[in-house]
Image (cartoon, rainbow, N blue to C red):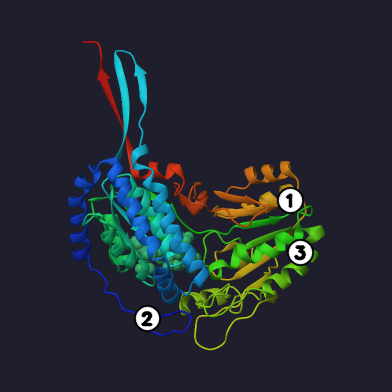
Amino acid sequence: MVDPATEEAVASVEQLDVDAVDAAVDRARRAWPAWRDVAPGDRARLLRRFAEAVDGDVDELAAIEVRNAGHTIGNARWEAGNVRDVLHYYAGAPERLFGRQIPVPGGLDVTFREPLGVVGVIVPWNFPMPIAGWGLAPALAAGNTVLLKPADLTPLTAIRLAELALEAGLPDGVFQVLPGRGSVVGERFVTHPDVAKLVFTGSTEVGMRIMAGAARQVKRVTLELGGKSANIVFADADLERAAATAPDGVFDNAGQDCCARSRILVQRSVHDRFLELLEPAVAAVRVGPPGSEDTTMGPLISEAQRQRVRGFVEDASEPVDVAFRGGAPAGPGFWYPPTVVLPRSADDAVWREEVFGPVVAVLPFDDEAEAVAMANDTEYGLSGSIWTRDVGRAIRVARGVQSGNLSVNSHASVRYWTPFGGFKRSGLGRELGPDALDAFTEVKNVFIATDQ
Ligand code: NDP
């Protein structure tokens, strides 16, 4: 592992092979019946203890993430706190896994929400802690055992979470972290017949491959994939606020965020004024050492990612017009400055493809219908924002945009108690919120005859 801010080695972690994965699946399979049968109140208590162990370790987890992933210390603390909060939230679930009672002639029908067995969670490098928590917490709460594969680049916080789970008293084999390559550990989750369900977050390309592989066993999948989300600014909006928060909406985590609002659509009459307001907001992004309290943007995760981002700007096949950009340190580290570009048309790669870096493209639109059409002219549909003072328009546009998570007059739409997931090629199924438990249980229907 390399510190993305310094390029210095941080740690090395053993990569598991297929035999080691099979042994872990076997442990998880054997641990399952006892975990499933833990009384709901006791399972809830164990999850709360796990949450408390994470809470006691927030500073350590955050420090690890700063070194391993280059996240700013403020973000990293929030991310560790998010794991704690998600565990607490789903600790309420074991005692609320209700079924239904459905009257039927000649008897009674009751339903149960049964856990699935062993769940495999595959995590990307962009948000190692929250994405781990979003999968593992509801899966465990519903009575499944969990195998978690962190990304090759960022396994360290997941390894620490597994230690904390054991310290909190979770039985052996109930939650295991398996570092290793996607092509080895991740693939084995897909092919192993004893892994009943896959939760995958990452690129759309790998997500499609996982879905195809899972089909062979009719294996359940939840997919959280890419995005190319629109930030739509109407002329009647609070332009100052829209411009001041647009950098937060796209440059957070150096733009390595599936929800990044990486396309800004601005109504033509206020386009130039919006750019005037955006320029100082971009200049104010403080790019620097991620461990410093006042840094608001750190480096990219790797040199490969920086090359990918440059491929959309400096090394693009067609020249790209950079409107303005912020600063970035020189010297070692995978730095890239926050950058605003003006595409020539909606066909440019920087407008269509997921950059996954601190690059935002701005284009004008004329009216509401065009804004919705432009926002939807993408294979993705994960998030987005709408800025207007007209409530009716806000709701019309929110209903019109084919996307799973939208915000009106705000740049933020992800909260652990509300559902999260994509439309179109941005994913399948929902995480977070109360309905996430549906992804980790199957409904069983039992008819009880009363006519004898
Ligand atoms: P990947 O989709 O390759 O990786 C995500 C996770 O899947 C990692 O844990 C990876 O393991 C694992 N994985 C890779 N191949 C397989 C496979 N065949 N079977 C099972 N698991 C597998 O994303 P990248 O890290 O390569 O990033 C590439 C691009 O994807 C980014 O630039 C970005 O555009 C997008 N992306 C989107 C994310 C999102 O949140 N929507 C998150 C990450 C990336 P390992 O890395 O250890 O090999």
- Ligand 1 near label 3 (Cβ, under 8 Å)? no
Cα separation, mark 2 vs mark 1, equals 46 Å
Residue ranking furthest to the top: 452
- Judge from the rendering whether residue 191 lies leftward or rightward of residue 152; answer left or right: left
The percent position of residue 43, horizontal first and vertical second, equals: 29, 46
Q: Which numbered circle lies on residue 335?
A: none
> Residue 274 got which mark?
3
Expressed as whole percent of the image width and height from the top left, the position of residue 228 reads 57, 59
Q: Position of residue 381 (x, y in %)?
A: 55, 52
> Which quadrant of the structure image shows residue 282?
bottom right
- The residue type indicated by label 2 comes to Val
Q: Earlier in the sequence, mark 2 or mark 3?
A: 2
Residue at 80% x, 65% y: name it: 273
Q: CA distance from mark 2 to mark 3?
A: 42 Å
Give the quadrant of residue 383: bottom right
Query: Residue at label 2?
Result: 10
Q: Vertical placement of 46 versus 290: above or below? A: above
| Badge 3: residue crowd in 10 Å (few <14, some 14–19, many ≥20) | many
Please tell me whether mark 2 or mark 3 is closer to you in this view: 2
Which type of secondary structure does the marked residue at label 2 adopt?
A: loop
Going from the N terminus, do you reach mark 3 or mark 1 first? 3
At x 51% / y 67%, what residue is drawn?
75
Give the residue number, with chain letter if any, for mark 1. Answer: 388
